[in-house]
Image: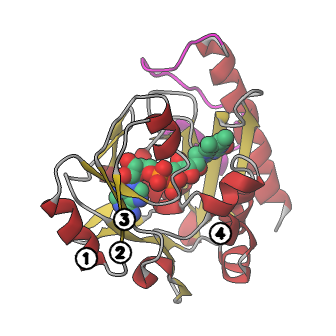
Amino acid sequence: MNTFQFHSTKTIQLAKDAFSANENAKFLSGGMTLLPSMKHGLIQPNHLIDLSKIPELQVLEESNEFLTIGAATKHDTVATHPLVQSAISGLAYLASQIGDPQVRMRGTIGGSLANNDPAADYPAAALALKAHIVTDRRVIAADEFFTGFYSTALEEGEVITQIKLSKPIKSAYVKFKQAASGYALAGVFIALYANQEVRVAVTGVASGVFRWEEAERAFLGSEMKPDLQRDDVISDLHAPSAYRINIAQVLFKKAAQQIKNNS
Ligand SMILES: Cc1cc2nc3c(=O)[nH]c(=O)nc-3n(C[C@H](O)[C@H](O)[C@H](O)COP(=O)(O)OP(=O)(O)OC[C@H]3O[C@@H](n4cnc5c(N)ncnc54)[C@H](O)[C@@H]3O)c2cc1C
């Protein structure tokens, strides 16, 4: 691991100032992806700007329509907070399934979304729950935020401050864990809104999270094995593409049954 300078900041403005004053800087949130990447020599930042103690990034509040979660909110808080459990139970469950207790006590929702690992859990929730990713510069709809393999619409030095999620009537997340890492070999999030609006988002299966529109139509009908055809389905030593597709179909059925049985 290279040597670096650590900058502890207490406001978003101070974090932005530290970022622009220093070359080769990275924001640090929970460090659960950044620090392993540094240890493996994949990235070698000279400055780490710590976001974890900024009060504005810790909010967790509810309105009639939205649940708003600060970017530095830890996975464990999302999993256990009564507001999240009552407003979006599928999201609380999803957070409880990330990594292990150590990862959940440090990793954050903002860090996970900024990183956009194709097997991460939160991107599926953000896309299904019509998230608005609030940054220090603008508001980005989840539909435009995830732009591909580990890439997002974030610009250089842009900080996610909050994630604003539309509260569904019901939600469910089902994940099939990759045995060694615990990341999603496949994960399916379903959000059901008033007026029969359904959003289904899938992680782990392709080069990035995606909405599965055949499954959204299937949810409203009786078909429980929707077609899944994409040209970027992952095929690797953990699972060939046909297996991943089959798992996604099985997970969709389970998540749909959870929602339909919980009437
Ligand atoms: C053993 C292990 C198991 C794991 N298992 C899972 C799993 O099952 N499911 C899963 O989804 N994830 C898993 N993870 C990843 C974990 O969820 C991380 O917490 C997450 O990917 C990154 O969040 P972080 O807060 O640690 O971000 P960091 O590592 O601090 O940062 C990650 C990236 O995001 C940037 N960043 C951080 N915060 C912001 C912000 N507010 N604005 C802009 N950029 C920002 C950083 O500069 C960096 O590039 C696992 C990690 C480990 C180590």
Q: How many residues crowd around disc 4 within 10 Å: few (fewer than 14), some, or many (20 or more)?
A: many
The colour scheme is: secondary structure
| Label at residue 78 | 4
* Residue furthest front in the image: 3
Label 3 SS: strand
Q: Are marks 4 and 1 in contact (CB under 8 Å)?
A: no
**Secondary structure category for the residue under label 4:** helix
Name the mark on residue 133: 3
Q: Report the Cα–Cα distance between label 3 and label 1.
A: 21 Å
- Of the residues shown, which amino acid type is indicated by label 1? Leu
Q: What secondary structure predominates along the stretch shown in magenta?
A: loop
Q: Nearer the viewer, mark 3 or mark 1?
A: 1
Residue 85 visible, this orientation: yes
Nearer to the camera, 250 or 179: 179
- What residue is rendered at 63% in x and 50% in y? 189
Per the image, the residue denoted by label 2 is 9
Q: Which residues are magenta?
A: 212-237
